[in-house]
Amino acid sequence: LKQCKHLALSSNCIEKITGLKGLDNLEVLSLGRNQIKKLEGLDDVANTLSQLWVSYNLLDKLNGLEKLTNLTVVYMSNNLIAKWTEFDRFKDLAKLEELLFVGNPLWEVHTKSEDFRINVAGRIPWLKKLDGVPVDAEEQEKGKALMG
């Protein structure tokens, strides 16, 4: 497994992320449709991981995400993220280009009031694509103004 670049473990009832030591070339970790509650156990792949797919899990906090500084893509739709404070963990992910967040409680509330994309653009100004749609210049400007 030492040469493994893409590890797909979706739909396996996994509750905890473990056993990634030695995966020195891992770039894509696919853990969608499991029972994961915490983003822990990723330290061993923090330097190489560029994509994290954790949609349809039980995540309500993003502790540990800030260590994954090489991430360019994060798919985390349909989890339990409900607070903007969790977005603070993205501030160290300067390479992040694409985020899928649809279906989280925070998304549900702010999509109805139509300010979700602007809030995200203000918090992650370098983001290029949100929920499959490019972030445009107007959203970036409004987000920048919103965050002050």
Image (cartoon, rainbow, N blue to C red):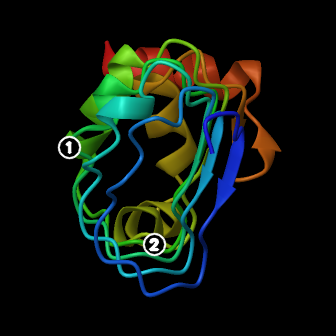
Depth-wise, is mark 2 or mark 1 nearer the camera?
A: 1
Q: Nearer the viewer, residue 111 or 24?
A: 24
At label 2, counting other C-alpha atoms closer than 10 Å, the crowd grade (few under 14, some 14-19, many 20 or more) is some
Report the label total.
2
Name the residue carrying label 2: 108
Query: At 47% from the left edge and 24% from the top edge, which residue is drawn?
Result: 124
Q: Secondary structure at mark 2?
A: helix
Q: Nearer the viewer, residue 59 or 105?
A: 59
Disc number placed over residue 63 in the picture, else none: 1
Q: CA distance from mark 2 to mark 1?
A: 21 Å
**Quadrant position of residue 136:** top right
Q: Is residue 12 left or right of residue 140?
A: left
Dot 1 amino acid type: Asn
Q: Are marks 2 and 1 in contact (CB under 8 Å)?
A: no
Query: At 40% from the left edge and 78% from the top edge, which residue is drawn?
Result: 14
**Which quadrant, please, contains the C terminus?**
top left
Query: At 55% from the left edge and 23% from the top edge, which residue is drawn?
Result: 48
Name above or below for residue 124 compared with residue 134: above
Q: Secondary structure at mark 1?
A: loop
Horizontal and vertical percent for residue 130?
67, 43
Horizontal and vertical percent for residue 120?
48, 36
Name above or below for residue 41 compared with residue 38: above
Q: Is residue 106 left or right of residue 30?
A: left
